[in-house]
Image: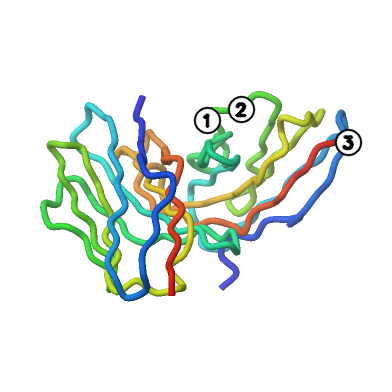
Amino acid sequence: AQTVTQSQPEMSVQEAETVTLSCTYDTSESDYYLFWYKQPPSRQMILVIRQEAYKQQNATENRFSVNFQKAAKSFSLKISDSQLGDAAMYFCAFSLQGGSEKLVFGKGTKLTVNP
Amino acid sequence: NAGVTQTPKFQVLKTGQSMTLQCAQDMNHNSMYWYRQDPGMGLRLIYYSASEGTTDKGEVPNGYNVSRLNKREFSLRLESAAPSQTSVYFCASSEELGTGPLHFGNGTRLTVT
């Protein structure tokens, strides 16, 4: 079974600074997808970024980027120029390609942005 | 765009009562899911439906049943609620199973007393 580990229950960052959230996963498969979801206090789950394992290039979405290290099974999220609206729970998630599996989530990291 | 709509938003039940959580999506997605979110536990999959007419157990299915009524709707039923089922429940959908991304509803906060 696949597992996802987020080792940082809480993180904080100053507004306009950069923060990196860690995620590691365990799988014996070679084709899979990785995701970061954001959950603000409103409770809505919002997709932040997605990475296909077969792509060597790290995914980026505006101020959000990932550092995908396939051999190390690591998938960290970097938030640049942090904004107050980035404060939320962040969940790392994994799914296998091929339609036979579903998303497995980590336990989340609570990010606080200090003004 | 409505996306994924869940009802109700909040519910309080007494132990032993039953209820059904409703979920509908308007994105023509094939796959739908029910997750529960507990503090410190992240999201855990209860049941999922890869496509219309199929349902499968997830990580924590005990005490729940589901129905994929049609392509749009996927309901979750608690037959005899227990305090351990106090949680926030999320419905989600995706185009196909496994490829993501998931589109989530706004959640239902359920308290069982």
Distance CA(mark 2)–CA(mark 3): 20 Å
Closer to the camera in the image, A108 or B98:
A108
Residue B58, labelled with which disc? 1
Label 1: state its secondary structure. loop
- Asked if A28 appears above or below A102 in the picture, the reply is above
Q: Residue at x 29, y 70 (%)?
A: A17
Assess whether mark 1 and mark 2 are in contact (beta carbons under 8 angstroms). yes
Q: Nearer the viewer, mark 2 or mark 3?
A: 3
Q: Which mark is residue B61?
A: 2
Residue that carries the numbered disc 3 in the rendered image: B14
User: Which quadrant is home to the C terminus of chain A?
Assistant: bottom left
> Same subunit under labels 2 and 3?
yes
How would you rate the neighbour count of disc 3 (Cα within 10 Å): few for under 14, some for 14-19, many for 20 or more?
Answer: few
- Left or right of A41? Residue A98 is left
Can you give x and y, in whole percent of width and height, for residue B93 in the image? 51, 52
Residue at 27%, 66% (x, y): give it.
A18
Q: Chain of mark 3?
A: B
Colouring chosen for the image of the structure: rainbow
Q: Residues within 10 Å of mark 2 (few under 14, many from 20)?
A: some
Mark 1 vs mark 3: which is more N-terminal? Answer: 3
